[in-house]
Amino acid sequence: MFEGYSLAELGSIFAMQGFAGLILFSVFVLMALGLAIIFGQMGVINMAHGEFMILGAYVTYLCSSFISTYAPALFPAYFFIAMALAFLASGALGMLVEWGMIRFLYRRPLDTLLATWGLSLILQQIFRSVFGAREVGVVLPDWLMGSVAVTDTIEVPINGLFVMGLTIAITVVIYAVMFRSRWGQGVRAVMQNRVMAGAVGINTEKVDRYTFGLGCGIAGVAGSAFTMVGSTGPTSGQLYIVDTFLVVVFGGAQSLIGTIASAFTISQAQSTLEFFLSGSTAKVLTLLTVVVILMLRPQGLFVLKVRR
């Protein structure tokens, strides 16, 4: 397979493949962060999480088209505007869904699975009716185009570096919000003992709504980042929902560090195997390996220790 390649060329090939795995890792982390909050903290199986991501991607597409047409002077900075709008749109829809549906289904995980699965089908049809069945893409600003030459044979896409930087920034913000803020303490208190949290004056219904909205809003930001590495279609979110759940469960449903470690492990394994095998075979082998590990360690890679 590698006949005719020098050691330097093989090193360059594996380095580029490793960087492709880092981009996939960034998308997984952005998707899994929101799901880790919704599933890990709230116990809600949100099968429509991919559609919240695609909503953010479509908001980015609309923002790109609108600004390029009516405010071209803002086009170099439109992506930051689009990310903010994607977060607000997905977060607002998430809070509406929590108020209208999810709040009646707490502690009924199978019911939330079925309800959110139906919601995902509804959202897919809405996207198909509004934007059409064909996939769409965004036009990136000039400063996100091109690549950075690391060596004579290795070039790193600038948009990939931006996605990784965005992932690091959002991870730090989520860590600060969930583990270093008073609101985050309230969220964890509600999820650990709802009755006691309500007894000490925490508005548990408001915490639920804002927490679900935060998770969906992060998925919207993931959708903005997704537009840099792929095209957007009505069913694009379904391509990542299984991998995202796998990342959250494999890392430990309530562990932020576990989510990051799991995303890195799965993305790098899948990217490396795709170099030697077909894409579908690589995904199957990765999933089988994770399933075997979960059979041996059902709690995931990391377990959140709670005082009882």
Image (tube, rainbow, N blue to C red):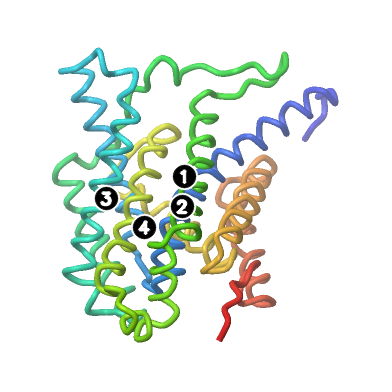
SS label for mark 4: helix
Residue 90, numbered circle: 3
Residue furthest front as drawn: 200
Q: Badge 1 local density, few (<14 within 10 Å), some, or many (20+)? A: some
Residue 170, numbered circle: 1
The reply, left or right, for residue 41 in relation to residue 267 is left
Amino acid type at mark 3: Ser
Q: Badge 3 local density, few (<14 within 10 Å), some, or many (20+)? A: many
SS label for mark 3: helix
Residue 141 location, x and y as percent?
Answer: 37, 19
Q: Nearer the viewer, residue 305 or 222?
A: 305
Which residue, given by chain and number where applicable, does mark 2 sit on?
A: 174
- Label 1 and label 4: CA atoms lie apart by 12 Å
> CB under 8 Å between callouts 1 and 2?
yes
Q: Badge 4 local density, few (<14 within 10 Å), some, or many (20+)? A: many
Foreground mark, 3 or 2? 2
SS label for mark 2: helix
